[in-house]
Image (spheres, rainbow, N blue to C red):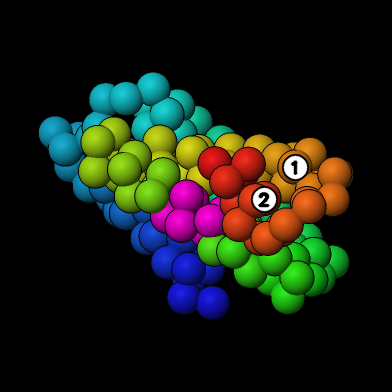
Amino acid sequence: QACFYAAYGTTAVAAVWFAFINFLGDELFHPLDFFSNKLRTRPYWFLIVLMAFAGLLAFDFVSGEMDELRATLPELVVTIYVQGFMLVGTMMMRESAGAAMVTMLGHMIISKFLVIVITILPAPFLPGVLYSNCFL
């Protein structure tokens, strides 16, 4: 659970940070990267990213997929969350909050497909470790 809160908590911090810096802050401090510029000049894109993020989280909670995956392959779930946390943290420090939000949204979508692809074949030994390594 701690990895889940770390990954998605930093994304929530990135969204709040983005809103304060880009919508309420002085124009002198606005980041000049592509994602921040698009999300700032077209606020509906910011809302679309937030809605997509919330929709994917709601889908995970309602469908129970992450709970089932957490019960059967906890190593894979930890790998997914830690990778998301590292991606968001790196993008926050090196790029901007807008880039961090878009990165986490992309990570959520891509990781779902990767989990489906790597768990197709049954693992001959240590399935959690083997699938985690394949995911990375």
Q: Helix or strand or loop: what does disc 1 sit on?
A: helix
- Residue at (39% x, 22% y) in the render: 34
Q: Nearer the viewer, residue 110 or 118?
A: 118
- Residue at (46% x, 44% y) in the render: 101
Residue type for callout 2: Tyr
Q: In terms of image quadrants, where is residue 10?
A: bottom left
Give the position of the N terminus as an image quadrant.
Answer: bottom right
As drawn, 135 above or below 69? above
| Residue tagged 1 | 118
- Residue at (85% x, 44% y) in the render: 121
The magenta segment is 79-85
> Mark 2 or mark 1, which is nearer the start of the sequence?
1
Left or right of 95? Residue 57 is right
Residue type for callout 1: Ile
Q: Nearer the viewer, residue 95 or 49?
A: 95
Q: From the top left corner, tell me how far across and down residue 65 is, in percent.
A: 80, 64
Disc 2 residue crowd, few under 14, some 14–19, many 20+, Cα 10 Å: many
* Residue 47 visible in the displayed image: no
* Residue 45 visible in the displayed image: yes
- Residue at (37% x, 27% y) in the render: 37
Q: Is residue 75 magenta?
A: no
Disc 1 residue crowd, few under 14, some 14–19, many 20+, Cα 10 Å: some
Q: From the top left corner, tell me how far across and down residue 25 is, in percent.
A: 22, 47
Distance CA(mark 1)–CA(mark 2)? 6 Å
